[in-house]
Image (tube, grey):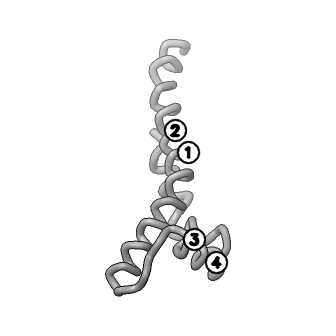
């Protein structure tokens, strides 16, 4: 049993690190996408304005729009 756990541990640690990384990167990616969309529409787009827009419209949870538990679980082995 110890050999099995030793073999599986890297996969679980890798999956967990992927979940943490996605949780940290999601707000940054949301800001990036909003800047791209506003730029295409000819509007002035900066990180500060994107953050202010998300906070005014949806609060903190707005940064995690599109983020799902199902996606996170799919990262696990």
Task: Judge by depth and name the residue closer to the eye, 37 or 70.
Answer: 37
Name the N-terminal-most of marks 3 and 1. Answer: 1
**Quick check: marks 2 and 1 in contact, CB under 8 Å?**
yes
Residue 56 percent across, percent down from the top left: 65, 80
**Quick check: marks 2 and 4 in contact, CB under 8 Å?**
no
Q: Count the marks: how many?
A: 4
Residue 26 percent across, percent down from the top left: 51, 58
Mark 4–mark 1 distance (CA, rounded to whole Å): 22 Å
The residue under label 2 is 17
Mark 2–mark 1 distance (CA, rounded to whole Å): 5 Å
Residue 71 percent across, percent down from the top left: 48, 56
Name the N-terminal-most of marks 2 and 4. Answer: 2
The residue under label 4 is 58
Residue 66 percent across, percent down from the top left: 50, 68
Task: Judge by depth and name the residue closer to the eye, 49 or 11.
Answer: 49
Name the N-terminal-most of marks 4 and 3. Answer: 3
Depth check, mark 4 against mark 3: the one in front is 3
**Residue 29, relative to residue 39: is it above or below?**
above
Depth check, mark 3 against mark 2: the one in front is 3
């Amino acid at each position: 049993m110890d050999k099995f756990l030793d073999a599986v541990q890297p996969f679980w640690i890798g999956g967990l690190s992927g979940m943490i990384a996605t949780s940290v990167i999601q707000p940054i990616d949301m800001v990036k996408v909003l800047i791209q969309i506003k730029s295409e529409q000819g509007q002035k787009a900066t990180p500060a304005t994107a953050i202010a827009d998300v906070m005014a419209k949806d609060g903190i949870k707005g940064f995690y729009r599109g983020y799902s538990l199902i996606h996170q679980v799919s990262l696990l082995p």
